[in-house]
């Protein structure tokens, strides 16, 4: 009598670099791998398959990737059958260069064919040679692929991929391609399915999210989409990223202000405050237009928290140009600024511009900008002290929560708040990621707030239920009896405390 033996499932690890689009793509990569029978590697165990989902925006992205690949070479040599895959923007850019510099890599795939990963891994294993597949255009919209979301209560939803802009510093359009939009019905169907699973917050994603609709000729498609999302029952918070000032129109501001579930937070990339530098960057707006958008958003949504991106040291930037950026930071009163030193990227028009700024000058300006941006953000955060804010309890947002005995959450305006989970009697409050609490802010720092006052209200949510279901220990053993067939029972209604 023969016995059947089953080999253990192969394990995987996905390492993600770069923007939110890459994070969302990695959720699809993990979904594809698990759909193909792979399982996530335990924290202390070397994975059988390591996937790098790369970014090409910064100059050190190349160095970081090849450094990590170099560290894995002896690991792979010591683990027969281990495979390494490289995908994302850097893979789209470097193509065959990756296997030339790191011949121990098994698979290279681009931004347009993430769905090919399981097949390419199997092909590389059988053929015992590297598989490189880079498509020049998108064949299948990524949202149709299996997805394993990182969060049970919040989700990314892509509304478009690619970008039609030609910013001289940016390589993304060359790697992600021209903008392709999803139809509104597909987007809303995905959101409704997510809400049915317990998700209560979605972030709409696009390289240029407010240009949505260009492919089917509707200039107000994005504002209409925001209003439609606001009518999805059970969806409590809607965010979006990242818009472009050139296409940011008043109908979007009105939709934000008039749709209660669209959160009062806005990320509006400035890049530079100098009209001359903006022209050299091919950013089709100028300082006055940018500040006009900020003013109109604040007029319609007084408590909006506005964040931005800024590049220091773009070729040809003078001290006067830099001071124009500093002026905008002071005037716009950003709640946070992601600041970058200009990084020359081969293949971009800016890489061959004359008058590249010396590193020492860029560094000095960068430090001055960071100092001002942090001070402005701190001053803006101090204005929140004493206010009661509603938080969605988060998982993994507070790195020091264990040491401080706090939990963390995001306010409606997306500010990060660390709070003490006790009630007015000092008793612990039972809250889960995805639940809602109200707290009074007691302290402000440049990049976060603290609420060490008692929790005022707790609202247990379907999102918290979803998190609890996901993290509950799985039953072990062999179940007996026949399986049941039918529609899953709906999630129970969330309890709500009186406000």
Image (cartoon, grey):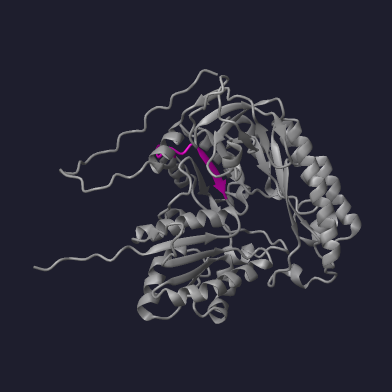
Query: Can residue 303 be seen from the camera position used here?
Result: yes
Query: Can residue 215 be seen from the camera position used here?
Result: no
Nearest the eye: 387 or 296: 387
Number of numbered callouts drawn: 0
Q: Residue at x 30, y 63 (%)?
A: 8
Q: Quadrant of residue 328?
A: top right
Q: Quadrant of the C terminus?
A: top right
**On screen, residue 338 above or below 252:** below
Q: Quadrant of the N terminus?
A: bottom left
Percent position of residue 429, x then y = 51, 27
- Left or right: where does residue 72 sit relative to residue 375? left
Nearest the eye: 37 or 3: 3
Is residue 93 found inside the magenta-colored segment of the image?
no
The outermost residue toward the front is 403
**On screen, residue 493 above or below 88:** above
Percent position of residue 260, x then y = 58, 29
Q: Residue at x 51, y 18 (%)?
A: 498
- Left or right: where does residue 337 sit relative to residue 499? right
**On screen, residue 429 above or below 43:** above
Q: Residue at x 56, y 30 (%)?
A: 421
- Left or right: where does residue 484 sit relative to residue 201? left
Nearest the eye: 60 or 11: 11
Q: Which residues are magenta?
A: 195-205
**On screen, residue 269 above or below 460:** below
Percent position of residue 217, x then y = 58, 50
Nearest the eye: 4 or 89: 4
Q: Quadrant of residue 28?
A: bottom left
Q: Residue at x 49, y 78 (%)?
A: 104
The outermost residue toward the right is 320
Percent position of residue 120, x then y = 41, 71
The outermost residue toward the top is 498
């Amino acid at each position: 009598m023969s016995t059947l033996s089953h080999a253990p499932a192969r394990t995987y690890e996905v390492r993600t670099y770069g923007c939110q689009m890459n994070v969302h793509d990695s959720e699809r990569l993990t979904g594809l791998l698990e759909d193909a029978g792979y399982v996530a590697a335990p924290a202390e165990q070397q994975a059988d398959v390591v996937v790098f989902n790369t970014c090409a925006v910064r100059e050190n992205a190349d160095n970081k990737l090849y450094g990590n690949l170099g560290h894995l070479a002896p690991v792979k040599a010591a683990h027969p059958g281990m495979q390494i895959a490289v995908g994302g923007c850097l893979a789209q850019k470097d193509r065959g260069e990756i296997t030339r510099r790191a011949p121990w890599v098994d698979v290279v795939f681009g931004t347009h064919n993430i769905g090919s990963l399981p097949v390419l891994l199997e092909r590389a294993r059988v053929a015992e040679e590297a598989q490189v597949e880079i498509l020049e255009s998108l064949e299948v919209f990524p949202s149709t692929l299996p997805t394993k979301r990182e969060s049970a209560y919040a989700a990314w939803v892509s509304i478009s991929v690619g970008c039609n802009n030609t910013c001289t510093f940016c390589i993304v359009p060359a790697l992600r391609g021209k903008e392709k939009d999803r139809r509104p019905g597909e987007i809303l169907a995905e959101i409704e399915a997510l809400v049915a699973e317990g998700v209560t917050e979605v972030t709409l994603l696009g390289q240029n999210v407010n240009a949505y609709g260009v492919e089917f000729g509707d200039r107000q498609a994005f504002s209409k989409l925001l209003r439609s999302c606001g009518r999805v029952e059970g969806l409590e918070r809607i965010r979006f990223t990242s818009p472009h000032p050139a296409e940011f129109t008043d109908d979007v501001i009105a939709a934000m202000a008039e749709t209660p579930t669209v959160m009062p937070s806005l990320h509006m990339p400035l890049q530079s405050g100098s009209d001359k530098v903006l022209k050299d960057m091919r950013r089709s707006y100028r300082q006055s237009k940018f500040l006009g958008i900020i003013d109109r958003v604040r007029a319609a949504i007084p408590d909006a928290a506005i964040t931005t991106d800024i590049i220091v040291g773009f070729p040809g930037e003078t001290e006067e140009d830099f001071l124009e950026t500093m002026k905008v930071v002071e005037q716009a009163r950003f709640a946070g600024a992601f600041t970058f030193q200009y990084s020359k990227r081969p293949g971009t028009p800016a890489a061959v511009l004359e008058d590249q700024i010396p590193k020492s000058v860029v560094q000095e300006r960068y430090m001055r900008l960071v100092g001002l941006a942090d001070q402005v953000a701190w001053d803006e955060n101090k204005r929140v002290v004493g206010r009661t804010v509603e938080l969605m309890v988060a998982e993994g947002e507070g790195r020091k929560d264990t040491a401080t005995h706090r939990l963390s959450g995001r306010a409606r305006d997306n500010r990060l708040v660390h709070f003490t989970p006790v009630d007015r009697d000092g008793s612990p409050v039972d809250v889960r990621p995805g639940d809602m609490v109200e707290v009074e802010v007691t302290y402000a720092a440049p990049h976060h707030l603290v609420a060490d006052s008692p929790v005022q209200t707790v609202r247990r949510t379907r999102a918290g239920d979803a998190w609890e279901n996901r993290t509950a220990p799985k039953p072990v053993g062999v179940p007996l009896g026949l399986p049941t067939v039918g529609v899953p029972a709906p999630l129970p209604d969330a309890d709500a405390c009186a406000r």
